[in-house]
Amino acid sequence: MATKTGEGFSSSFGAIMAAAGSAVGLGNIWRFPYICGRYGGGAFLLVYICFVFFIGMILMMSEFVIGRRTGEDPVKAYPKLKPERPAWRFVGLIGLITCFLILSIYLVISGWTLNYFYESAVGTLASIQDSDFGVHFNEFASSVWRPVLFIAVFLALTALVVIGGVEKGVERVSKLLMPILVVLIFLLCIRSVTLKGASAGLTYLFHPDFSKLTGEGILAALGQALFSLSVGMGVMIVYGSYLPKDENILKTSIWITVCDFFIAVLAGVAIFPAVFACGQDPTGGPGLVYQVLPVVFNSMGTIGRVFSIIFFLLLTLAALTSAISLLEALTQWLSGEKIKRTMSAIIMSLIVFVLAAAASFSFGDGIWSGFKISGLQIFDFLDKATGTILPPVCALLTIIFFGWVMNKEDIIDELSNHGTIKVGYFKVFYYFLARFVAPVALLVVLVAGIKN
Ligand code: TRP
């Protein structure tokens, strides 16, 4: 363990669970199904697979290499690898700023999710009429204190885990929660595909209809691939710095990517067949989970309430392990000789709480909804910055550093664990994907995204 505080993951399983916990989150269960629904189901899925495995996974491996090689936080890692070009530290800094901004809206959505878990458990959702769920969601999300209260509770849980430390907090909680999450999602899938009329949902998800796949859809697929794998903002550099020295980086990255991909697909399998079986609209957008699914659960009678509880618990747990990794990245950066882990985590939590509350106040018809930054409400501004602009910028710079600036021998040495494992795949990985394919694809997306 080479990190400055000497902290790290204790086992390969723990490391994989922690990094998969970071990757699997609201992005898989809340965002993937509605984006996939919007851009034509199966056709989107095909493009998404390519981006996940040929770009996302390559970035993940690169970030792991940078993190484990240096044992540093993202801001120090770049200049440590290339001391004669200290300006690269700004890439680490942009990454951390992105993490900070993502965490703020992540907390808002996690707060909604926790509230829906609570409302499922106490029976509030079961008592609402089908046609009123839209109004219910908007009233709740635009209100002043209730969302903020749930944000505070969720953030407190996140901070407690981070304060617990890398091994005793982050790793232990991920090892516990990730298997639970997999069981919950399988339960939901089984229920969903056995409903009458479910097959239309599966056809929708898996049958490629290329006429619906627009250029915008392709951009969304790449943005989603980066977001879902938590790459392009330095978090995997942080987790890389905690990886055991004998961990096989290639294998670990494949495991995490496969796990993240399948959980997104399973979320689609849990959601679309049920949506079709109830005759609801699959293109419901961001409100799919909060406005359409409750209707589906209510139509199942008493057992629907159990599934509603399971679903929102699943979403809350997935969000928690991702929020933990975001707060961990910020905490690792702030802690050092003078400021200890506990204090760093508390300071970061307080600052991000203020921004999350502001984003919440600005959502929908909230009290600050009139306040605009370049024409957008705070929530929408943060969503756009963190969803389409900052991660591809940071990802592009990271992969350029990796492919064109960093010392090739260092990379081979790190990937092969100092020559103890074979890295025959290196040539394809490095020369083809990392140096050419990934940077060009990222550049295209960025230019197209900015033009939009
Ligand atoms: N990957 C997470 C998800 O799918 C969200 C996320 C994006 C994230 N960037 C991150 C999580 C950075 C941790 C760190 O929901």
Image (spheres, helix red, strand yellow):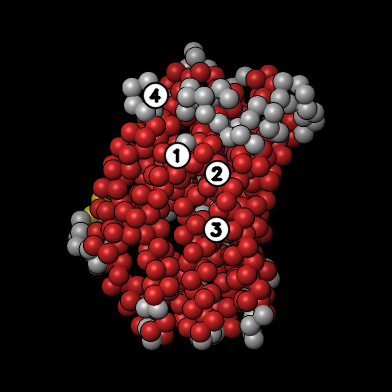
- What's the distance in space between the residues labelled 3 and 4, CA to CA? 34 Å
The first of marks 2 and 3 along the sequence is 3
- Image mark for residue 172: 2
Instruction: Locate residue 388, reporting x and y percent.
Output: 45, 50
Figure check: 274 above or below 343 = below
Please identify, in this view, whether the residue under mark 1 or under mark 4 is nearer the observer: 1
Query: Visible in this render: residue 54?
Result: no
Q: Is mark 3 within 8 Å of ligand 1?
A: yes
Determine the secondary structure under disc 2.
Answer: helix
- What's the distance in space between the residues labelled 1 and 4, CA to CA? 16 Å
Please report the residue visible at 33 percent of the width from the left and 43 percent of the height from the top: 349
In terms of depth relative to the viewer, which is nearer, 174 or 275?
174
- What's the distance in space between the residues labelled 1 and 2, CA to CA? 9 Å
Instruction: Locate residue 317, reporting x and y percent.
Output: 50, 57
Badge 3 density bin: few <14, some 14–19, many ≥20, Cα 10 Å: many
The first of marks 1 and 2 along the sequence is 1
In the picture, which quadrant includes the N terminus?
top right
- What's the distance in space between the residues labelled 4 and 2, CA to CA? 23 Å
